[in-house]
Amino acid sequence: MAFLDNPGIDPVANAFPHLFEPLRIRGCTLKNRIMSTGHDTTLPVDGTVNEALVAYQEARARGGAGLIVLQVSGVHETARYTNHVLMATDDSAIPGYRRVAEAVHRFDTVLFAQLFHPGREIAEADGGLLSVAYAPSAVPNERFHVMPSPLKLPMIRAIVSGYGDAARRMQTAGVDGVEIVASHGYLPSQFLNPRVNLRDDAYGGDLDRRLKFLREVIADIRGKVRDRFVVGLRISGFEVDESGLSQDESLQAIIGVADSIDYVNVTLGSSATLGGAIHIAPPMSSKTSYVAPYAASVRQRVRIPVFVAGRINQPQEAEAILASGQADVCGMTRAMICDPEMPNKARRGAADDIRACIACNQACIGHFHKGYPISCIQNPVSGRELQYGTVSPARVPRRVMVVGGGPAGMKAAIIAAERGHRVSLHEGQKRLGGQALLAQLLPGRAEFGGLVTNLLHEMAAAGVEVHLGSQVDRTMIESESPDVVVMATGAIPYRPDFASEGALQIADAWQILSESVEPGHSVVVVDWRADWIGIGIAERLAQSGRRVRLAVSGIAVGESLPFYVRDASVASLHKLGVSVLPYMRLYGSDSDTVYLQHMTSGEAVVIDSVDTLVLCTGHQSVTDLADSLDDLSLDVRIIGDAASPRTAEEAVFEGLRVATEI
């Protein structure tokens, strides 16, 4: 690496020459090829840009993103697909967009806004009342069970005009361009799709007529903005459903409007079906960069820049896409939710310092589906920039002992050390990571181990003193006399009390994953939480050729999981032939039988010829050490599963929170 000695050569440019090459698009220049794609944050509360959203996007601009695309903005009153969607239907919205534009531009980041109408893809009701959905034709969707009303010509004209009016407002606010959302089966796509658009007027029929709506939208925008204003299109290269746009149909539509737009942003999937929706935010079981070939097929046929998004987690992955000519810009949205500083780190040659996204979907798209503001299980600052965006130095450095080396303890140690405290972390096992080490052994969950890898790297950088195989007791704490003890002692599997007779093999999920127990051929998995564990254990055992029955204490398997993670896993269970029994609680067992009870009817459900019963019945906190300190005058903070067994998200957040309070 002799070039490092030459001050005239930028070593980063050699590592990622394509990623950090500027790109001119009409009236603006992207400083690099890294894009944060439009994604709903649930941060706005009244349909307008608020300070939380400004702070969120400003963090990504400060982190070095070349392009930020804002979340969708409705162009017509019928575009309110959720209760918290941004609306660009009135000039009163302009000041909010101006604030976010000014914040982003301070870091030489380009800002586009998404213009949106969902058509029949209405996800939520207004105040509990079902909204009227409008689409080209009365063709229902599968996912939201919406039967839309066919659009009449006056409303089509009003919606078309709404796109142009919204673009004009964005331009007035200082936004650099707009992106028409025709992806994921939304309204423009519904006009393009011959199985959804059954009209017999000028807007339906052959491709040219089905393109009429989109062409009119583009023309209306162009007629209301300056020449330098960018107009792009987001579209699914394939909607991954028999009733959705095929790859060829999507390509022909793109070709049909390519001469009138400045770029095309290629993604995958559809909101209209459960299978197609998985690709809106593909889980970690999906391959990285898997959408790039669809973008490449478009790039071969058009002259405008082609953007792509879909599990592009690391700068080296984006560099490979760009270098191979598959696309011109890479969407790395979740990568920057996890680490907003990712572009800057890559730029300065510190790629190893990047906190890599693991595509768990739990706090990003998972929060959106629950109506909560966006965040990240690894980076709880995301979405909370106003509260935790700045790590302030401790007023008085203190001696902090962290007991437990799972995600909660590791995060607490990192933040406390970064604030200037003297931190020691004690872990009884020979490895750090806690339950995350087991979680990564579940099928399709290997990347979950990245949570531990990232925390280990951050601990080393923060200078945390680590003691492995260290069994902490009251005597040790009294001897070391720390100022603060952070208890992150975690939890162990909970075994419920149930009637059990005979020699039926009974194991818990930890024993299966650690392979300390060899289960028999016929297995019943009792899943109390309806989360990753039960569904993953069932899949793992079925993959090994065993007959598996999954009894879920809920209305459906994976009930508590982010939707796209759940649906991908359910598809795998179905292919493997796993039998799923919902509404089940464990009642008892004997030598070869498991007795269940229906949770609502109370009736017995008997499963015969069982070799092994696997309990995925939750965890119980380990609190012995904390309890032994009750009589000491000591500042003790209990976090993570030690406080109450939950998930890695709560563990990492509580590590952050308690460390900022010390």
Image (spheres, rainbow, N blue to C red):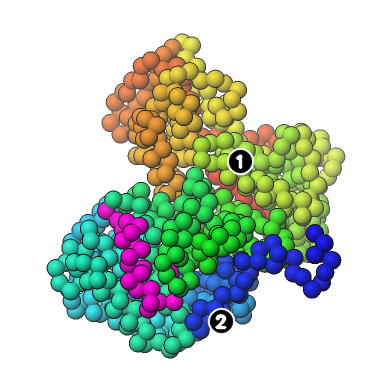
Identify residue for label 2.
102
Q: Residue 577's spot in the image, x, y percent?
A: 37, 30
Residue visible at 36% across and 82% down in the picture? 221
Give above or below for 307 relative to 364. Answer: below
The type of residue carrying mark 2 is Glu
Q: Is residue 245 magenta?
A: yes
How far across and how far down the image is residue 464, in percent?
Answer: 78, 50
Name which residue lies at 43% across and 41% down. Answer: 569
- Residue 498 is left or right of residue 335, and the answer is left
Position of the C terminus, as image quadrant, is: bottom right
Return the residue found at the far left: 200
The kind of residue on which mark 1 rests is Ala
Q: Where is residue 88 drawn, in percent x and y?
A: 38, 78
Helix, strand or loop at disc 1? helix
Comes first in the chain, label 1 or label 2: 2
Give the quadrant of the N terminus. Answer: bottom right
Residue 145 image point, x, y percent: 25, 54
Please tell me how crowded label 1 is: few (under 14), some (14-19), or many (20+) other residues with Cα within 10 Å. Answer: some
Residue at 52% in and 67% down: 328
Task: Judge whether 479 appears above or below 248 on screen.
Answer: above
Assess whether residue 461 is covered by the magenta stretch. Answer: no
Q: Nearer the viewer, residue 124 or 71?
A: 71
Q: CA distance from mark 1 to mark 2?
A: 40 Å
Q: How many marks do you count on the picture?
A: 2
Asked whether 629 or 389 is in front, the reply is: 389
Mark seen at residue 75: none
Is 93 on the left or on the right of 195, as rendered?
right
Outermost residue on the front side: it is: 300
The stretch of residues the image draws in magenta is: 243-265
**Residue 232 higher or lower than 505, as above or below:** below
Hey, which quadrant is residue 151 in on the image?
A: bottom left
